[in-house]
Amino acid sequence: MSDNFGSAEGFHFYRIVPHGLRAGATVYTNRPHVWRAAEGQDFPASLSNADVVQTFFGELRRPSYAIEITVARPVELFVLMPRRGNPLPWLTEAFERTGDTVFLHEFESAAPPHPFDVWKRTVRQAGKVTLGPSNRDDHGNPVGMYGIAARAL
């Protein structure tokens, strides 16, 4: 994984956890937030035990940021995108919404869990996939960082 963030934008990194996506899995490398299922529901089976990328929560205002993922074999690639805001063309044109929802739970916060829509793309051969910026609100401001997961085909 790599991105086009510069070092001036602060220290950050990604963590890949093989078979690590499940209820209670850590979302970001720099915040104690976790993924959850809807109250009274099971965690989506399509995501359970997928390889998860813990992204980072940081300055996301640059409209052209990109994350490049190199996959070693065919995969189902998932993007867990905040439901807030407007999805951008890089997502809507290359991924399809699955209908599943996961929730980001903030530890030590009274805030209700935030819903994230699950988007999927089948990558049929090894290679690079580029992901773009997170959803934006009506004023062009980012609404929060997304999650990434993959499952080998």
Image (cartoon, helix red, strand yellow):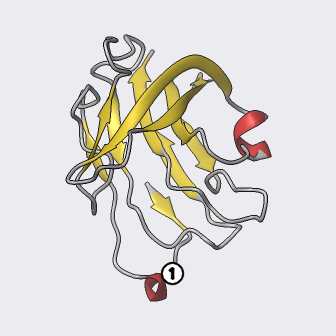
Left or right of residue 84: residue 64: right
- Residue at position x 34%, y 23% in the image: 37
Which quadrant holds the C terminus?
A: top left
- Give the secondary structure at mark 1: loop
Displayed quadrant of residue 67: bottom right
- Residue at position x 79%, y 34% in the image: 93
Q: Where is residue 44 in the image (x, y as percent from the top left)?
A: 39, 15
Residue in the foreground of this view, choosing between 112 and 121: 112
Left or right of residue 107: residue 2: right
Q: Where is residue 89 in the image (x, y as percent from the top left)?
A: 79, 44
Q: What's under tag 1, amino acid-wise? A: Gly
Q: Residue furthest bottom?
A: 8
Query: Dot 1 corresponds to which residue?
Result: 6
- Residue at position x 32%, y 35% in the image: 35
Q: Where is residue 4 in the image (x, y as percent from the top left)?
A: 56, 70
Q: Is residue 100 visible?
A: yes
Left or right of residue 93: residue 59: left
Residue in the foreground of this view, choosing between 56 and 32: 32
Displayed quadrant of residue 13: bottom left
* Count of marks placed on residues: 1
Residue in the foreground of this view, choosing between 120 and 106: 106
Q: Which residue lies furthest to the front in this view?
A: 110
Q: Position of residue 92 (x, y in %)?
A: 75, 35
Which quadrant holds the N terminus?
A: bottom left
